[in-house]
Amino acid sequence: MADSAVQGGAVQRRPVEHVPALPPLVGDYETRRRTFTWAGARAWLQVDVEGHLNMAHEAVDRHATGPLADTVAIRFLSRTAAPTELTYAQLREQSDVVAVALRALGVEAGEAVCTLLPRSPELYLAVLGTLKAGGVYCPLFPAFGPEPVVERLRLGHVRVLVTDSLSYVRKVAPHRGSLPDLEHVLVTDPGEAGAPEGTTAWAAALATGAAAYDPLTFTVAPTRPDDPALLHFTSGTTGKPKGAVHVHEAILAHHVTSEFALDLRPGDVYWCTADPGWVTGTSYGILGPLSCGVTIVTDAADFDARRWYRILQDERVTVLYTAPTALRMLMRAGVGLAREHRFPALRHVVSVGEPLNPEAVVWGIEAFGMPVHDTWWQTETGAIMVSNYPGMPVRPGSMGRPVPGVVVAVLGQGPDGRAEVTDGRVRVLGPDEVGELALRPGWPSMFRAYLDDPDRYAAAFADGWYLSGDLARVDADGYVWFIGRADDVIKSAGHLIGPFEVESALMEHPAVAEVGVIGKPDPLAGQVVKAFVTLKVGHEPTPALARELVAFGRHRLGSVAPREIAFDQALPHTRSGKVMRRLLRARELGLPEGDLSTVETPS
């Protein structure tokens, strides 16, 4: 437990003289796996004498009064503006002001604050200020269309939204009446005409916070390790999006895995290319790396291969965390472009978001002089669970080996592909047998609930295991190999897309009677969304209508909309009336159709 003192009835943390670090993992996986415990790792946390712990303090404030105070915490790059920087000391003070501003708006412990923003200082400050105020931070992907945005605001009972004027006017304002919990909208770019009606300028809110802020008396909210801190929405195969709730102690898993799997340490320049609107961009684009005292590089520009190589070279990036889709786009540009640049500082390249194909692992050696290291985790796990670690032999195509402190198993499958549970018990399989990948609960970043859905949460566990929904095998040496999803979630360009959301949006078109959505393999994005559409009577399946449906889907859903439309007046159904996406996928890809006993036979 870190040194703390109680002054004036509020907990005051003493300055940190140094940044404690776990011993390096490189070359010592077996020893660490044998000796590591989460209980021992908790000594790193600065829990005060009353048992309080706050994620933002662990990520930023503990560094801001020590030797890293003047170290650049975040460097913001943009195609249209000069780079800007925030040191750890500046990040602490400015996020304090945001916390005061949010409290002035009435944000109380456990209430949700959401961002719908590009990568900008306002986004990062909103994250940390929300946590310091005791609120729950909820990110939204800025390319979402109106429906996904509004649905998540509604399901999350979001109290405050921080966004830009255009996103608000196009995606939120028309639906404001259906969002009774949304009391305040802060816009970061009000323009000469001022903030849109019903909103407040971010600068005005911060001015109020700054006027009330006293650095000598300000204290971070007295949150406890198990208090909610993060709300990440993830789409399932059916029904509404799931809101996975994570707690403040999750920062310990973010920190440990940032050191173990990403090999981060003070003095590093680190670039995570994931958008902060997704869980990777929060856990490993903000919280984990800051907890390690590194300098984060973030770029607001769209992907451009030459620009990316230039950033790696000029910013002297030491660790890169990116997605297989981005790696495939770099590969597409040719290794010659990579060789026009020099990366003397780069020592570790890591992948996340979807399975990494072996070709990309080997390509890393050609482009960077080192293999790409894959990782596996989920929104629900909150942090990396399986990884190819620095210094450990990489087996191309494998996700790696479990994080020390994480116990994995492969469970026998039932007819639906999920783990088979008999009398409350599961069957653990042996080496190289394929089944559902499961984890033994106990790591700090494990989600603690699906918001307002306890039954769905309970269904994610069986016989003392968390059921991931992914099919995998574990070889005799403990390397985990991804096989596929047990359900129908589509992974496209590192994003998880729930077919139900896409189907529901398309069915609002007046010509559409029914929709089935699958993921179709794509050499660049991994998968693209393809929709099979049954038309209502009186509508003809023309190329013009297909183009109209693609545009309609993009307007409603943004970048997760279908790329392809196929018309099918006889979609396959189960006897209970559900469209059989599995059968659609098999027919599209020429795969075996499997058991057809549940297919409804047309009369």
Image: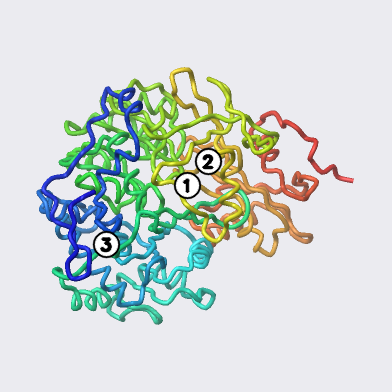
**Cα–Cα span, label 2 and label 1:** 10 Å
SS at mark 2 in the image: strand
Circle 3 residue: 125
Q: From the viewer's perspective, is residue 204 above or below residue 486? A: below
Neighbor class of circle 1 (other Cα within 10 Å; few <14, some 14-19, many 20+) is many
Q: N-terminal of the two: label 3 or label 1?
A: 3
- On the image, the x and y values in percent for residue 200 come to 33, 78
Q: Residue furthest top?
A: 476
- On the image, the x and y values in percent for residue 225 come to 35, 54
Q: From the viewer's perspective, is residue 549 above or below residue 100? A: above
Q: Are marks 2 and 3 in contact (CB under 8 Å)?
A: no
Eye-nearest disc, 3 or 1: 1
Q: Residue at x 19, y 60 (%)?
A: 92
Q: Amino acid at mark 3?
A: Leu
Q: Amino acid at mark 1?
A: Glu
Q: N-terminal of the two: label 2 or label 3?
A: 3
Q: Which mark is residue 466?
A: 2
- On the image, the x and y values in percent for residue 28 come to 28, 23
Residue 396 shows up from this direction: yes
**Cα–Cα span, label 2 and label 3:** 33 Å
Circle 1 residue: 380
Q: Are marks 2 and 1 in contact (CB under 8 Å)?
A: yes
**Cα–Cα span, label 3 and label 1:** 24 Å
Viewer-nearest residue: 119 or 47: 47
In this rendering, position of residue 591 left or right of residue 492: right
Q: N-terminal of the two: label 2 or label 1?
A: 1
In this rendering, position of residue 415 left or right of residue 396: right
Q: Amino acid at mark 2?
A: Tyr
Q: From the viewer's perspective, is residue 73 above or below residue 594? A: below
Residue 79 shows up from this direction: no
- On the image, the x and y values in percent for residue 55 come to 30, 55
